[in-house]
Image (cartoon, rainbow, N blue to C red):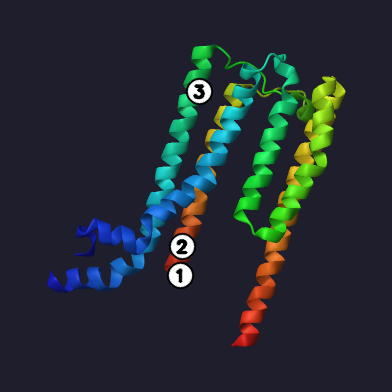
Amino acid sequence: MAMTNFEDFAERTQLVSRFGRAILIFWTPLVILAVVPIAVPLGTDLPWDSCGILIGVPLAAAIGLYSAYLSNKASSRLQWQSQAGLAPIALFALLSRDHSALDFAIVAYWAAAMLAVVLTVIWRFKHKEVDGRQRKDQK
Amino acid sequence: MGILRRFIESTLWPRLEEPVVEIVVHLAVTFMSVLSIAIIELLLFVLHIEGKVVPGTALVLHWLGLQTEVTLSDWMLALEVIAATAIIVVGIIKAVRALWR
């Protein structure tokens, strides 16, 4: 029976690559989302409630880079631009250690990351649509 | 008995192979995710910081008009529920798509 040879089965169904992909897509961002809000305040001398920027920036950057990794070159450029454009704001807020500046930077960074993700999804969808139409025309 | 076995081996199993793999893989990743969050929660209890408010969330919640706070413990529970639901749902969708292919 096919099931008796596990190696054959694993190779045929690409079990390892499927498992690796599922870990990369689900487990990695989950652990980032769980660990960053704990690790950042513990690892800095800043008061607990002032660490928003230190959490907001790496989380937003992680989301941006992660969606860039999952998408292709053109949309990854979009992600990089959105992250890089807001880096000076984040740096200024971090250096000023002013609460309102910190708050502003957190919201701005999150908004930029989310916008970049939405634009990437739209871009990918359109790109796929064009690809599909071209393939149909070729047939 | 032989006919049934041949039917399973040649007709049924080749069709079910991919959906079964998708379900098993996603269940395994769900288990890993819940276990990881449980370990992190244990760490929170050991450090006595489970009741701390997640930094930055108060601002967003107040901005949304919600007079509430999200503690690290609440955040872990939310992550657990959302992650488990999302992973299983994606697994089921992928399995159904593989079956129809």
Q: CA distance from mark 3 to mark 1?
A: 40 Å
Same subunit, tags 3 and 1: yes
Q: Chain of mark 2?
A: B
Please report whichever mark, 3 or 2, sits nearer to the chain's N-terminal start. Answer: 3
The residue furthest left is: B1
Q: Chain of mark 3?
A: B
Report if the CB atoms under discs 1 and 2 are less than 8 Å apart. yes
Which element carries disc 1, helix, strand or loop? helix
Quadrant of the image for the N terminus of chain B?
bottom left
Q: Quadrant of residue A10?
A: bottom left
> Within 10 angstroms of label 3, few (less than 14), some, or many (20 or more) residues?
many
Q: Is A112 above or below relative to B18? A: above
Q: Quadrant of residue B39?
A: top left
Residue under label 2: B96
Q: Which mark is residue B41?
A: 3
What residue is drawn where x is 85% and y is 21%?
Answer: A96
What residue is drawn where x is 53% and y is 40%?
Answer: A28
Q: Amino acid at mark 1?
A: Trp
Please report whichever mark, 3 or 1, sits nearer to the chain's N-terminal start. Answer: 3
Q: Chain of mark 1?
A: B
Q: Horizontal and vertical percent for residue A78?
A: 75, 53
Q: CA distance from mark 3 to mark 2?
A: 34 Å
Q: CA distance from mark 1 to mark 2?
A: 6 Å
Residue under label 1: B100
Q: Quadrant of residue B50?
A: top right
Same subunit, tags 3 and 2: yes
Q: Amino acid at mark 2?
A: Val
Which mark lies nearer to you, 3 or 2? 3
